[in-house]
């Protein structure tokens, strides 16, 4: 191996050591499970390394990796299992008087709703509410217009509002089917 | 309200991210370097084979035709119904003259007995199952018999058993706070027993046989992965005793974060009791033997292991080739249908004349537009 290649690889290893945890967290929010998040991060790092020679000297290595992460996730198609996709039920605001197990169930229900969103809507929400990106930054990362960012966010929030306003939410839990829409 | 929701999202994302299970692998970088080498070699191989590469960026498609003797035209943007039927075995649920039926892959029309417009049609080993509001209709594959069942909920979900011999319809009952599962045999004779399970909503039915029910739920959060005896059903009122009443020998609950960790409830069929669960890891200790013993079924550990192994299903990274407009439709559309056998996915919106079809049978997934047959409502989702 050449000295230059060895040095380049070492830089890449340092980048991975510094940033992989952050990539994992974002990947977990995007995919909703550990196994797929790990695959997504690994694929992202592979693609990042393929471009390493070109991007390593720039200030935008992390932005590049994040763009890869989000867009790779959008192009992944998970085989669905024979059970339903995540149900459209969500909890209302946490109530301190409820016990731990119940609150856990409610949070899980909320999470299931988020992971049931279309991928692009979920990506917009993660970028906006987890990474605190502006709509312009989100548009750049996802390669879409700011108008699309706004419409996707609006649609996702409207879905949440609708479900938070259902009678079921007053009880903390509710349910509906995927096919009986 | 909007700000409340936005605050809730910030809190939820921050909390989830903080508790996200991080990889402890220390070879991520080296694995990426090795993977990049394989990708380079594959690209070289593809070019040497005379293939054109179609690269989709985030929003734009770039057509890079191979200049040699290989592919010189873009891939076809449309798939015909005949191609979908013959190549992918796609069947279509259709409405014709006010009645509902299925157009099979052989272009044969099979009438469904459904009295109302189906919202979802599935194919099991011996029948079509058409779901509609408060109703499931089970029709023999040749259309000769049909039987319908009314359900006490407007909206419900179905779960199909892995052998496609049976299914369950389930809904959340707000009065009892339970998820109610009605188990149906997948035949159209209407003579089968339809037992009912009433479970705590944090449990989900994953699969079942004639002896064992396999559920999923969050266990490790509570036990920390402890091996031994627990009393979830008693402490958390899970409702496992309803499986005993329904005639099952055992219930196995797999953990949602590590589905190799399971808790086994040994039941007495017909006796409304589920006193304790024995928890452990599949393939370790005597867990598999315990499942066999509790289920009185040597095949039971295999069923549980299959659920565990496929709980987090593989992500397929696809180099999607084909029609950019159809790809957008595939990503964005409201109605999404996925072939459980992994051959295709279809998406369309309420007003769409054409559907987006993703063919996943090749090395690369190709997306195209499909103009469905006259009266088509949706593709049939086939489990056999």
Image (tube, rainbow, N blue to C red):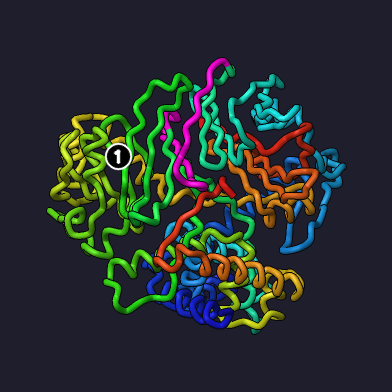
Residue at figure coordinates x 68%, y 44% from the top left:
B358
Tell me: residue B370, above or below residue B104: below
Q: Which residue is found at the position 45% from the left and 19% from the top?
A: B189
Work out whether residue B200 or residue A64 is closer to the camera in this orientation and state it.
B200
Q: Position of residue B37 (x, y in %)?
A: 58, 57
Total marks placed: 1
- Say whether residue A41 is visible: no
Between A119 and A175, the one lying in front of the other is A175
Callout 1: SS: strand
Q: Position of residue B163 (x, y in %)?
A: 42, 30
How dense is the environment of label 1, judged by Cα within 10 Å: few (below 14), some, or many (20 and up)? many
Image position of B355 (left or right of A35): right
Q: Is residue B206 left or right of residue B10?
A: left
* Residue B56 image position (x, y, % from top left): 73, 57
Residue B2 lies within the magenta run: no
In the rendered image, the quadrant that contains the N terminus of chain B is bottom right
Residue B84 placement: quadrant: top right
Q: Is residue B153 magenta?
A: yes
Residue B80 position within the rendered picture, expressed as x and y whole percent measured from the top left: 79, 33
Image check: B273 left or right of B201? left
Which chain is home to disc 1?
A: B
Q: Which residue is mark 1?
A: B213
Residue drawn at point x = 33 percent, y = 39 percent: B196
B220 to A66, vertically: above or below: above
Mark yes or no: residue B263 visible: yes
The quarter of the displayed image where residue A131 is located: bottom right
Looking at the picture, tell me which residue is in the foreground, B234 or A168.
A168
| Residue stretch rendered in magenta on the structure | B144-166
């Amino acid at each position: 191996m050449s000295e230059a290649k060895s040095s380049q690889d070492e830089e890449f290893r340092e980048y991975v050591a510094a940033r992989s945890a952050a990539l994992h967290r974002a990947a977990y929010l995007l995919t909703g499970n550990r196994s797929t998040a790990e695959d997504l991060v690994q694929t992202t790092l592979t693609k990042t390394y393929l471009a390493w020679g070109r991007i390593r000297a720039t200030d935008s290595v992390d932005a590049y990796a994040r763009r890869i992460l989000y867009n790779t996730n959008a192009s992944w198609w998970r085989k669905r299992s024979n059970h339903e996709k995540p149900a459209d039920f969500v909890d209302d605001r946490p109530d301190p008087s409820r016990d731990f197990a119940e609150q856990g169930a409610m949070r899980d229900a909320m999470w299931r709703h988020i992971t049931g969103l279309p991928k692009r809507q979920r990506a917009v929400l993660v970028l906006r509410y987890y990474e605190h990106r502006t709509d312009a930054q989100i548009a750049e990362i996802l390669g879409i217009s700011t108008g699309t960012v706004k419409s996707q966010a609006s649609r996702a929030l409207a879905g949440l509002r609708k479900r938070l306003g259902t009678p079921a939410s007053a009880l903390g839990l509710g349910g509906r089917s995927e096919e009986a829409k | 309200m909007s700000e409340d929701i936005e605050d809730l999202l910030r809190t939820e994302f921050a909390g989830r991210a903080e508790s996200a299970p991080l990889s402890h692998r220390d070879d991520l970088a080296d694995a990426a370097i090795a993977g990049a080498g394989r990708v380079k070699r594959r690209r070289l191989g593809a070019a040497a084979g005379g293939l054109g590469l179609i690269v989709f960026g985030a929003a734009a498609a770039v057509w890079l035709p191979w200049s040699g003797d290989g592919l010189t035209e873009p891939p076809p943007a449309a798939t015909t119904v005949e191609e979908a039927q013959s190549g992918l075995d796609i069947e279509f649920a259709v409405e014709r003259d006010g009645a509902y039926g299925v157009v099979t892959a052989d272009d044969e029309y099979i009438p469904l007995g459904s009295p109302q417009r189906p919202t979802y049609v599935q194919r099991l080993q011996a029948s079509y199952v058409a779901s509609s509001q408060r109703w499931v209709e089970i029709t023999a594959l040749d259309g000769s018999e049909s039987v319908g069942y009314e359900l006490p909920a407007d909206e419900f979900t179905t779960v199909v058993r892995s052998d496609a011999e049976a299914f369950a319809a389930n809904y959340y009952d707000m009065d009892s706070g339970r998820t109610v599962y009605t188990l149906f045999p997948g035949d159209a004779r209407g003579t089968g027993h339809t037992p009912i399970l009433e479970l705590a909503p944090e449990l989900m039915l994953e699969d079942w046989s004639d002896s064992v029910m396999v559920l999923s739920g969050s266990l490790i959060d509570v036990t920390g992965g402890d091996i031994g005896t627990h009393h979830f059903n008693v402490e958390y009122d899970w409702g496992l005793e309803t499986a005993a009443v329904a005639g099952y020998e055992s219930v196995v609950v797999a953990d949602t974060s590590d589905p190799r960790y399971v808790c086994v409830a040994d039941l007495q069929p017909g006796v409304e009791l589920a006193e304790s669960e024995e928890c452990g890891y599949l393939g370790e200790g005597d867990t598999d033997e315990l499942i066999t013993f509790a289920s009185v079924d040597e095949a039971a550990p295999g069923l549980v292991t299959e659920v565990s192994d496929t709980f987090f299903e593989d992500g397929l990274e696809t180099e999607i080739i084909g029609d950019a407009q159809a790809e957008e439709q595939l990503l964005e559309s409201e109605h999404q249908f996925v072939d459980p056998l992994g051959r295709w996915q279809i998406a369309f919106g309420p007003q769409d004349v054409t559907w987006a079809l993703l063919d996943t049978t090749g090395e690369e997934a190709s997306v195209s537009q499909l103009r469905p047959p006259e009266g088509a409502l949706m593709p049939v989702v086939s489990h056999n």
